[in-house]
């Protein structure tokens, strides 16, 4: 369970930092942008081939990135909902 929580925390942090970098407009020319975008492009690049996923929202943030951020934020809500039903 601890490994799963650590993996979620690390992956969630990468997704949130990616979204922040894209909104601000930092690209791969800056070292932090190159590091974070390079690590997260492994997952996001194949998913961006879905036609509507590449729709731009704010800055360089796309619908795919926003969906990932919402997913990261809603996982704890789901865990709390199921934990409360155990009695």
Image (spheres, rainbow, N blue to C red):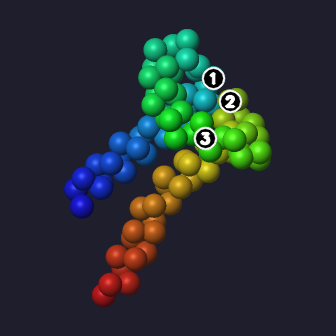
Q: Does the CB distance between marks 3 and 1 fall below 8 Å?
A: no
Residue closer to the observer: 19 or 49:
49
* Quadrant of the drawing holding the C terminus: bottom left
Residue under the image location 51 percent in, 13 percent down: 30
Location of mark 3 (residue) = 46
- Residue 48: image x %, image y %? 66, 40
Distance from the alpha carbon under mark 2 to that under mark 3: 17 Å
Q: Mark 2 packing: few (<14 Cα in 10 Å), some, or many (20+)?
A: some
* Quadrant of the drawing holding the N terminus: bottom left
Query: Residue 4 appears in which quarter of the rendering?
Result: bottom left
Q: In this view, does 52 lie above or below 17?
A: below
Q: What element carries label 3?
A: helix
- Which label is found at residue 54? none
- Which label is found at residue 25? 1
Give the mark, 2 or 1, whose residue is nearer the N terminus. 1
Q: Does the CB distance between marks 2 and 1 fall below 8 Å?
A: yes
- Residue 62: image x %, image y %? 68, 39
Q: Is mark 2 on a helix, strand or loop?
A: loop
- Residue 65: image x %, image y %? 61, 42
Q: Mark 1 packing: few (<14 Cα in 10 Å), some, or many (20+)?
A: some
Location of mark 2 (residue) = 60
Residue under the image location 33 percent in, 48 percent down: 7
Q: What element carries label 1?
A: loop
Q: Say whether residue 40 is left or right of residue 56.
A: left
Q: In this view, does 76 lie above or below 48?
A: below
One can see residue 78 in this view:
yes
- Residue 43: image x %, image y %? 52, 41
Give the mark, 2 or 3, whose residue is nearer the N terminus. 3
Front disc: 3 or 1: 3
One can see residue 16 in this view:
no
């Amino acid at each position: 369970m601890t490994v799963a929580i650590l993996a979620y925390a690390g992956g969630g942090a990468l997704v949130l930092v990616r979204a922040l970098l894209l909104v601000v407009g930092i690209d791969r020319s800056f070292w932090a942008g190159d590091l974070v975008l390079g690590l997260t492009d492994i997952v996001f690049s194949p998913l961006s081939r879905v036609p509507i996923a590449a729709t731009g929202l704010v800055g360089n943030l796309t619908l795919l990135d926003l969906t990932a951020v919402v997913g990261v934020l809603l996982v704890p809500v789901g865990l709390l909902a199921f934990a409360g039903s155990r009695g």
